[in-house]
Amino acid sequence: MSANKRIQWLHSRISTGNYPNANQVAAKFGISHRQAQRDVDFLRTKLGAPLEYDPSRFGYYYTEHFSLPIYITSDNDDEYSGFSGKMGGAASSDSTVIQMQIPYTAEIEVKSRLGVVELKNLITAQKGRNRYVCEFHSVELFLGMLVSLNADVKILSPEWLRERAVEAAERILKNNKK
């Protein structure tokens, strides 16, 4: 498993409030604890993630919203070669390059079946009654979709997305008071 996939997994777990740690990364991907810790350090130092360790939860969390830079993969996917953006990395001219943005993940609660049907292209899993995991590439488009649904939707995680939705709703209400 490449370092890129490990970083994506680590970011996804942190973004959804699961507090992963180096031991979990090592166990998940069958690598040494030292290599897993290098992945964590790479996320913090090279990608600029606002990453902190919570000793009470035995894992890492973001202190503020963070998105991974664009992910680039090539035929010669060496350790950590696939991230660009903040790092300014570039692929060599003799490699095949696939570029994509790593999706955001959110857990939501939707009680309306019609709302679930309208979100079906974003839903990747069901986590119990009326609880769904969604993946999306644009925060603004996702929040706009939730607002446009004729259904009650609750953002369960990540917290930063819920806070952003509340801030946007408060701003709209404030600007539209008579």
Image (cartoon, helix red, strand yellow):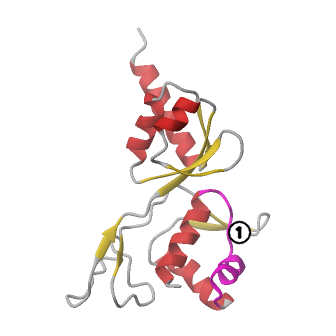
**Taking 173 as reference, is 98 left or right?**
left
Instruction: Name the residue: 43% across, 13% down.
Output: 177
Q: Position of residue 166 (x, y in %)?
A: 53, 34
Q: Position of residue 36 (x, y in %)?
A: 62, 84
Figure check: 116 above or below 136:
above
Quarter holding residue 26: bottom right
Q: Nearer the viewer, residue 61 or 121?
A: 121
Q: What amino acid type should be assigned to the residue bearing mark 1?
A: Gly
Figure check: 149 above or below 138:
above
The quarter of the rendered structure image containing the C terminus is top left
**Taking 176 as reference, is 128 left or right?**
right
Instruction: Name the residue: 68% across, 50% down.
Output: 127
In the picture of the structure, the residue carrying the numbered disc 1 is: 59
Q: How would you rate the neighbour count of disc 1 (Cα within 10 Å): few for under 14, some for 14-19, many for 20 or more?
A: some
Figure check: 167 above or below 122:
above
Q: Position of residue 169 (x, y in %)?
A: 48, 28
Residue 166 is at least partly visible in this image:
no
Magenta-colored span: 16-31
**Taking 34 as reference, is 175 left or right?**
left
Quarter holding residue 131: top right
